[in-house]
Image (cartoon, helix red, strand yellow):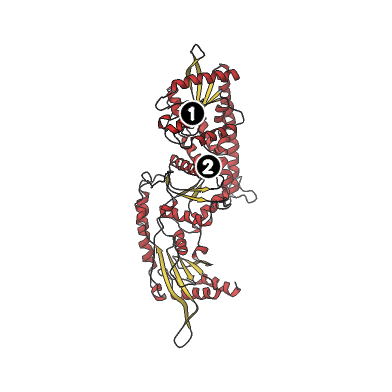
């Protein structure tokens, strides 16, 4: 662009629009003249004081303000900014411009259709460049008030248990008929905005009734590395994780990509769809089905305008809720800090202020550096405490081994029924629920089983351990090493499998992969298929064919427990002899 054209754009910042008017004829003509000279659309963004706060060369979509940079942003109100945009064709506002208006929650969008040379006045001379104008604004969407409280929301689900992205309802807006500049200048901005925000506030309150949970939008990305069935299983499992963490899944959006976008995971168009869907449904949290880098989180939050988390953060939140003992809370805090430390840079402008006080007045140490240093020190202290916990549990195990009491660890995918089986075998009162990671802290109980050919009674120790999950976060593996040692130090393992789950074979592979990653090779394992009362005959037949030495039980119905005791005795005898 020429320097003279840049100066004309800069002079727009000195213009002042009356606070109760959307625009004036003079400002519209000036904007149209500049747009005609540069032969490109131009957008001017104006606040409610009538001040021009942003000027951009391009369409409303190209020049839109990121949600986090808007002065006010939320489902219950408008942003306090209106956009006056020029358009080089004679047509109403297109979908792209209206979507940009919805994403920014603009007070209003004015589109000025301009001519190339201006109109010729009678008698000669150009009178202006604007042929016609359109006024657009958001309207309250009645369908959104029909969404009940999150505790009761039920979306129509597909066969895989989640809603398709095609069910998204577009935001609603109103577009005026073609207006001339005089009619446009007479529009009352204050009256328009006050009426709209009153409706949005009523709509927002209807959504917030009994809203004790996060309203969640799940985003899944399928690459060539996994099959469609594995991808669907992953999304269903993520929806269960969100539900366990206390959130309500309102929608699931999917995208198939050859490779992950390095900046935003999904493509630019899909990011816009996510932002629009989140706004339409009143979502306050977006959850991705994979780990996100700090820069990806920052980029997504800037463009979407609400909090974005990944699968690992959801799992950490569940662990934080489930931890009851001091040891459990200690390990969860360590895992959360190790996850948080490299992500401090993605926490926005709150970390860019200078620190103050003793110990922070170094050569320009920022709040970010202070926080990072404090977290590093806290991690070091927690690592020492976890090491002490490891040593304490090791002494307890040595004491049990000295008494020559064999030990067995219950392992398996989360929600396989480990705690239910422990209760059924030992009459323990461990908390059980149809949830992922219902129990976190290991529980050890005594169990008497028949031993040898004489069926003499033998006492063993059986431990219920934390459940595993596909791609268990590395920070949890490290933080829970003291708990996972209960598995590696046991004489034998009982690998419990939920046979009623469609992905039971994948669960077996995931557990075995995690066991293979442990520093010490665990003892021999006996595969136990649980919940056979809920499995169909074909699944039972396949499991018997693939695992002929497995035991089939129903812990909740107490089916097959006597057979399990006998096979457990044989397993202990084999493990002790081999040991």
Number of on-image labels:
2
Residue 10, picture quadrant? bottom right
CA neighbours of label 2 inside 10 A, class few (<14), some (14 to 19), many (20+):
many
Residue 471 or residue 32, whichever sits in front: 471
Q: Position of residue 48 (x, y in %)?
A: 44, 65
Q: Secondary structure at mark 1?
A: helix
Q: Position of residue 273 (x, y in %)?
A: 47, 55
**The N terminus sits in image quarter:** bottom right
- Res. 373 mark: none
Looking at the image, tell me whether mark 2 or mark 1 is earlier in sequence order: 2
Q: Is residue 16 above or below residue 388?
A: below
Secondary structure at numbered mark 2: helix
Label 1 belongs to which residue? 544
Which is more toward the observer, 28 or 151? Answer: 151
* Marks 2 and 1 in Cβ contact (< 8 Å): no
504 or 421, nearer to the observer: 504
Looking at the rendering, which quadrant does residue 386 occupy? top right
Q: Residue 366 at x, y = what percent? A: 60, 50
- Rendered view: 480 above or below 299: above
Using a 10 Å C-alpha cutoff, classify the residue at mark 1 as few (fewer than 14 neighbours), some (14 to 19) or many (20 or more): some
- Residue position for label 2: 312
Which residue appears farthest toward the bottom when viewing the image? 123
In the picture, measured across the screen, residue 74 lies left or right of residue 510, that is left
């Amino acid at each position: 662009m020429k320097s003279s054209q840049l100066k004309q754009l800069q002079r727009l910042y000195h213009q002042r629009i009356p606070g109760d008017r959307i625009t004036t004829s003079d400002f519209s003509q000036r904007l149209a003249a500049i747009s005609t000279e540069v032969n490109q659309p131009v957008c001017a963004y104006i606040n409610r004081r009538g001040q021009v706060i942003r000027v951009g060369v391009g369409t409303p979509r190209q020049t839109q303000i990121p949600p986090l940079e808007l002065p006010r942003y939320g489902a219950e109100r408008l942003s306090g900014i209106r956009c006056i945009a020029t358009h080089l064709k004679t047509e109403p506002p297109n979908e792209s411009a209206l979507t940009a208006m919805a994403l920014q929650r603009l007070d209003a969008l004015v589109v000025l259709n301009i001519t190339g040379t201006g109109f010729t006045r009678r008698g000669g001379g150009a009178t202006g460049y604007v042929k016609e104008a359109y006024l657009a604004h958001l309207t309250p969407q009645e369908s959104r008030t029909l969404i009940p409280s999150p505790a009761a929301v039920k979306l129509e689900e597909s066969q895989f248990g989640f809603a398709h992205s095609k069910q998204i309802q577009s935001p609603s807006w109103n577009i005026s008929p073609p207006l001339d500049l005089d009619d446009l200048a007479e529009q009352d901005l204050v009256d328009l905005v006050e009426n709209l925000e009153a409706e949005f506030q009523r709509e927002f309150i209807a959504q917030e009734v009994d809203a004790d949970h996060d309203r969640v939008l799940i985003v899944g990305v399928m690459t060539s590395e996994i099959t469609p069935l594995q991808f669907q299983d992953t999304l269903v499992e993520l929806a269960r994780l969100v539900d366990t963490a206390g959130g309500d899944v309102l929608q699931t959006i999917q995208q198939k990509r050859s490779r992950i976008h390095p900046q935003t995971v999904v493509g630019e168009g899909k990011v816009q769809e996510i932002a629009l869907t989140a706004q339409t449904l009143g979502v306050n949290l977006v959850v991705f089905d994979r780990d996100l880098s700090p820069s990806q989180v920052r980029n997504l939050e800037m463009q979407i305008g609400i909090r974005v988390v990944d699968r690992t953060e959801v799992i950490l939140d569940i662990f934080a809720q489930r931890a009851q003992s001091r040891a459990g809370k200690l390990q969860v805090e360590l895992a959360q800090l190790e996850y948080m430390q490299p992500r401090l840079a993605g926490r926005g402008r709150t970390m860019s202020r200078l620190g103050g006080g003793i110990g922070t007045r170094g050569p320009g140490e920022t709040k970010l550096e202070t926080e990072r240093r404090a977290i590093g020190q806290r991690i070091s202290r927690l690592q020492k405490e976890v090491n002490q916990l490891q040593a304490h549990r090791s002494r307890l195990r040595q004491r049990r081994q000295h008494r020559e009491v064999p030990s067995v660890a219950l392992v398996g995918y989360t929600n396989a029924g480990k705690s239910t089986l422990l209760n059924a075998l030992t009459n323990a009162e461990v908390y059980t629920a149809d949830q992922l990671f219902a129990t976190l802290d290991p529980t050890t109980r005594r169990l008497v089983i028949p031993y040898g050919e004489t069926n003499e009674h033998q006492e063993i120790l059986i431990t219920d351990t934390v459940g595993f999950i596909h791609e268990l976060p590395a920070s949890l593996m490290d933080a829970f090493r003291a708990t996972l040692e209960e598995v590696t130090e046991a004489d034998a393992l009982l690998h419990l499998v939920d046979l009623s789950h469609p992905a039971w074979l994948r669960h077996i592979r995931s557990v075995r992969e995690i066991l293979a990653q442990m520093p010490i090779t665990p003892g021999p394992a006996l595969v136990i298929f649980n919940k056979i009362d809920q499995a169909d005959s074909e699944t039972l037949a396949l499991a018997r064919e693939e695992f002929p030495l497995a035991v089939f039980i129903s812990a909740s119905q107490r089916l097959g427990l006597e057979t399990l005791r006998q096979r457990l005795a044989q397993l202990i005898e084999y493990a002790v002899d081999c040991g």
